[in-house]
Image: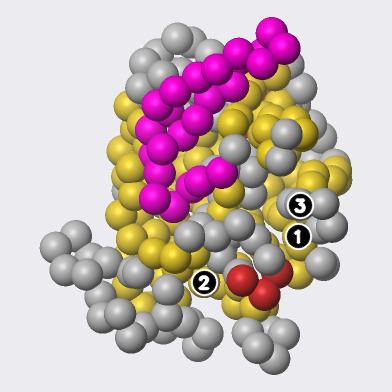
Amino acid sequence: MFPVINERINIHIRVIKPVSRSTQQSSKGNTMKTIPLSLLLSFVVFTLSSCSKSNPTGASGSQQILPLKLGNTWLMQYTVYDTTGAVEGMIYDTATVVTDTVISGVTWYHISSKVFGGGLTADKSDGLWEYTSSTPSLFFKYPANVGDTWNAPMNASSTYQITLESDSASVTVPKGTYTCCDYQLLLNSQPAVEAYLCPGVGFVAIDVYSITKSGRSYKQAYGELTSITLK
């Protein structure tokens, strides 16, 4: 569920050319690739109150780390960078919860997005889970303590290491300022994603990393929340 963008680390990806609101960028430029809902679109926190203080809740009053209900919609804008840090373009994406299905008594949701893609997602009592390759896995433990580290599978041979870096990160995006949970995700000991989630809101901001041919890690995209609709 994350916009993971690196072919060299074998993440499930779709290629998206950077585009502006009105003009698609040249096809000769680098491309942005996606993270399965299991990587950009999942991370958790110390206590409900510490991560949600001064933050809005969903319309239902829930405090899930990523509110899942049919019709919930997040508008995100992504700034895409090249290996030198220069801006290559922008991607504007709408992520909407479009369908649900019940498996073994658990309701799982699918989010439609050109950036986020992948499996089914569910909120459980211990956090946000994703159904990947027929196996449900916990990606965003909730609640958790700052410094907690856990693993989640990327595929049969690779594993993400996820750490809750902060439960009170102040993040300002076009939609406003939120007190967020800061989750760091590593793959093969390299940064893959740093995501800022607000309970009752979901993704507020996200850093997506890639790796150069020489093995150097660099920030490939930064996403930020511009609008949200919760049912």
The span from disc 3 to disc 2 (Cα, nearest Å) is 22 Å
Q: Which residue is mark 2?
A: 220
Q: Position of residue 43 (x, y in %)?
A: 67, 40
> Which mark is nearer the camera, 3 or 2?
3
Is 144 contained in the magenta span?
A: no
Q: Residues within 10 Å of mark 1 (few under 14, many from 20)?
A: some
Disc nearer the start of the sequence (3/2): 3
Q: Which residue is mark 1?
A: 186
Q: Residue drawn 60% across and 13% down?
A: 102
- Quarter where residue 190 is shown: bottom right
Residue at the farthest front position: 134
Mark drawn on residue 155: 3
Q: Element type at marker 2?
A: strand
- Magenta part, dominant SS: strand
Q: Relative to residue 146, is residue 56 drawn left or right?
A: left
Q: Position of residue 62 (x, y in %)?
A: 53, 14
Considering only vertical position in the picture, is 183 above or below 178? Answer: below
The span from disc 3 to disc 1 (Cα, nearest Å) is 14 Å
Q: Are marks 3 and 1 in contact (CB under 8 Å)?
A: no
Q: Residue drawn 70% across and 19% down?
A: 124
Q: Relative to residue 159, is residue 3 drawn left or right?
A: left
> Which mark is nearer the camera, 3 or 1?
3
Q: Element type at marker 3?
A: loop
- Quarter where residue 207 is shown: bottom right
Viewer can see residue 103:
yes
- What is the span of residues highlighted in magenta in the rendered image? 95-118
